[in-house]
Image (cartoon, grey):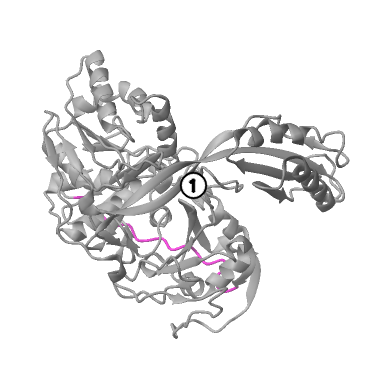
Amino acid sequence: MLDGGELDVLTGDYLAELTMLILGRDRLRDPSLGYAKTFLRQLEGCLGTALDRGVKIVTNAGGLNPAGLAAALGALADRLGLAVRIGYVEGDALARPDALTANAYLGAFGIAACLDGGADVVVTGRVTDASLVVGPAVAHFGWRRDDLDALAGATVAGHLIECGAQVTGGNFSFFTELPDGGHRPGFPIAELHPDGSSVLTKHPGTGGAVTVETVTAQLLYEVAGPGYLGPDVVTRLDTVRLSQDGPDRVRVTGVRGTPPPPTLKVGVNNLGGFRNSMTFVLCGLDIPAKAALVRGQIEEAVGAEGLEFTLARTDHADAADTEAASALLHVHLRDGDKARAGRAFSAAAVELALASYPGCTLTTLPGDATPYGVFTADTVPQDAVAHVAVLPGGERVPIAPPPRTAPLPADPAVPDPTAPHRATPDPTVPHPATPDPTGPGGATEPAVTDRGAAEPGPTRRGPLGELVGARSGDKGGDANLGVWARTDATWPWLRDWLTVDRLAALLPETAPLTVDRYELPNLRAVNFVVRGLLGQGVAASTRFDPQAKALGELLRSRLVDLPAELTGRAVDVPAELTGRAPGEDLT
């Protein structure tokens, strides 16, 4: 990024929910740690280049110890013979004796204060991912707290580039259509304008692509309803408009913002206990009976409490080799007792080798248990957090909370987590109505007004992914699944066809769970939030796909009755626009 072309600010996002747990365990062993050590190794080779070119660096690699990382960065600069001004942001860490880590998601104004104070590098702890972009924009353009639309636009830009190459073709449903087949996508750049609009692009000569669809895919990633909550602004995702602005340039406009909530999200990590896993290979005939035999034997050996059995039917009938003829039985054990979850369990599994089903073998050697963590989300009043910017000279600048907030119940895009399955009606206005209950439990389909949809016609059986793209991911124990139509003609069909009930039929594991459904017409997309699919979060999940990254591709692979008139249609190709961003833009 530093060598490839013009750049004003380089950001680095290091703090996934799982990362905070890992850093918490690091700090238990050594209180001087708690930050992403990889950041120091990366900066060793490029800090001088950034300083020479006047590129600011903003990162949340400080994790649980931003002051510690700032000090380590200063020592690195001294060793390299570089003069660097370092600011850092603190106040996110909350004192909770019953938690391994508890951190509030801070906003952008502490970052902006550090940059205004002359920092070359700004280190933070737990801020929202988008704040790494919003902060430099606030400092550059002088935005105030009440510039809600501009803050919302920058939040969208930050959300789009927070996951790096995912917006330039990484993890893209239609990767085979990319110029290089998705082999080495370049990293994205957001060109920010004074009004909060932006252009997403990448350095010339890098791989991948920036198109309306690659941007749509990332925009739908790990979001919930149209009201995208943040500490500085609630960003209305249902107002975002995307347009192609030339090769590898997508313009993002129209983003509206409303006042932020009076509370901050708090990510809490605790050690949940110990876990272990063993996998049995079941080959040939009588697969269910073989699995039942193993289950009974394991339960008799170690007790049934905490055991979980998952049978993956990877076997094929009349197969010519062992692997193709085999299913896999994954056996997981979670327990607060390390001894029971450790060798007592894994040794018991191995000891069945001569006294169980015919052909008994395992894919793993017996091993000890490992600790796992549990992630939960909480809230805390904004004014209860001591958000502080520590400037390069050591001055501590308190960051006041937003003077204007809006209670969460006032935003109908925020669903009630205690309600049953639901779906939003057509949100064609900036503030859609409260979602209506649908699906299993609610039992009825949402009332759909006449939208001019064509009468049912001939269909052809095929994978859903012929007509739609998808992107899925995790937020604690929930999963989100965004699905977008590739053409204007496909959107009315997708909107009316892909209900909560139909999702449950296509993905049966979602059927017993609470599912929220939202429509985003500007993106030709629907977004589902599947509550509790990932249990206690990625660190505790025994699901085959613990972060739900493949959930969207599973949905796209399901065979459905596709409208014949839609199959074979060309994908929309937006007309290329000319013109460059204004000279005062921030990239």
Magenta range is 564-581
| Nearer-the-camera pick, 102 or 242 | 102
| Nearer-the-camera pick, 375 or 461 | 375
Q: Residues within 10 Å of mark 1 (few under 14, many from 20)?
A: some
- The relative height of residue 543 versus residue 559 in the rendered view (above or below) is above
**Residue 168: horizontal and vertical position, in percent?**
40, 46
Which residue position holds label 1? Answer: 171
- Along the horizontal axis of the image, is 6 left or right of 45? left
The reply to whether the magenta stretch includes residue 50 is no
Which residue sits at x=38%, y=38%?
206
Residue 340 placement: quadrant: top right
- The relative height of residue 237 versus residue 26 in the rendered view (above or below) is below
Looking at the rendered structure, the kind of residue marked 1 is Asn
User: Does the rendering let one see residue 583?
Assistant: no
The reply to whether the magenta stretch includes residue 572 is yes
- The relative height of residue 81 versus residue 408 in the rendered view (above or below) is above
> Would you say the magenta stretch is mainly helix, strand or loop?
loop
